[in-house]
Image: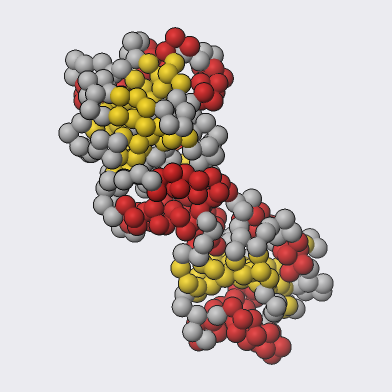
Amino acid sequence: MEISKAIKYVGVDDHKIDLFEGQFVVPNGMAYNSYVILDEKIAVMDSVDAAFGKEWLANIKAVLGSKKPDYLVVQHMEMDHSANILAFTKEFPEAKIVSSKMAFVMMKSYFETDFAEKQVVVGEGSKLELGSHVLNFITAPNVHWPEVIMTYESTEKVLFAADGFGKFGANDVEDPEGWACEARRYYFGIVGKFGDFVQAVLKKAAALDIKTICSLHGPVLSENIGYYVNLYDIWSSYGVESEGTMIAYTSVYGNTKQVVEKLAEMLKAKGCKKVVVADLAREDLHECIEDAFRYGKLILASTTYCGGVFPKMREFIENLTERNYQKRTVAFVENGSWGPQAAKTMAALFAESKDIKFAENKVTVKISMKEDTLAQLEKLADEMK
Ligand code: FEO
């Protein structure tokens, strides 16, 4: 993968990984991207996961031949990018390390050295001239760690965006769903809580003429940059990306599921543009989270359980609220054999959330769907269509 004559890809694809960051399923593997910029001075942009140190160093050497790098730019200290910094310094002892002040503090914890004699500390507005290429540094705190910097190479107009614009999936596996699907799951899973910080970086990026985005994960983005930036703007401002209603449910014996299927049918019949139904006990949690953020309306349907709500529903709501879920209409469907409590419990889980509108109608089911359930569903479908 060649970005330009001077900028080469030296990253790796991981097909052995089972869970990225210990929790995200990655059926198409994962890419840890790294790049080399060749000029009078040579910079390597970021490292890769611990398991791929040898492959990464071999990739660098294959690009450099007999030349040696002058700099390793460390944009982000999460282990999938920082694990091989020490190995790099052993292989290329003359090279300097370019990073934020905070990243060097982290390096001390990781490696018991902060590479004092090699440090080039950069912050907002710092520049590093490589020759005809110039690296312009942008701080990007909490996207999604506090030490993160991004780098704009102003000659070729390339934004090295750290984790920004990343996606799940190895680069040697074609993703038939395109960039957005796994980029959205990645964004809301990993960065979703930090929307305000992403907005701050997007404001800085708006002043730049960007021709190419080089993320630390996923493909190099070089066409229609506005498409990606616009989606990041929607996601980070908690805007509604697609019209429609999501119904997320849990069901123990199938009765709540039957109610949900009826509700989905009614929503469609009443003209709802898109109805997405998710069984929280069986579907990937992070697929469900991305859909909750994608659509503007969310109906939560759950069994009452231990005087509260079914555990998978509690986990789902907590995953939404800890990611600052907001600007949405939320409705509840509860089921209970003798004392339904699920709706009250679900609403209480949003107590700290801002800008959530609760639907006026709720549906209470006693064990299974009956005539009165249908009447309640009609009212809710009218409100949430
Ligand atoms: Fe890809 Fe936050 O590390």
Q: Nearer the viewer, residue 134 or 352?
A: 134
- Residue 93 vertical position relative to residue 226 in the rendered view, above or below: above
Who's the residue at 34% across and 40% down the image? 159
Q: Is residue 300 left or right of residue 131?
A: right
243 left or right, relative to 15: right
User: Which of the two residues, 62 or 8, is positioned nearer the viewer here?
Assistant: 8
The quadrant of the image that shows the C terminus is: bottom right
Q: Foreground: 48 or 172?
A: 48
Image quadrant assignment for residue 280: bottom right
Q: Is residue 81 visible?
A: no
Q: Quadrant of the N terminus?
A: top left
Tell me, what colour scheme is on the image?
A: secondary structure
Does residue 132 appear in the picture of this structure?
Answer: yes
Residue 168's spot in the image, x, y percent? 41, 47
Percent x, y for residue 316?
62, 57
Give above or below for 112 relative to 382: above
Query: Residue 114: x percent and y percent?
Result: 50, 15
Number of residue marks: 0
State the residue at coordinates (47%, 13%): 115
Task: Determine which quarter of the picture holds residue 49.
Answer: top left
Question: Residue placed at 37% from the left, 54% from the top?
Answer: 228
The residue sitting at 52% across, 31% down in the picture is 147
Above or below, 24 against 138 in this view is below
Q: Is residue 196 left or right of residue 343?
A: left
Residue 134 picture location, percent across and down: 30, 29
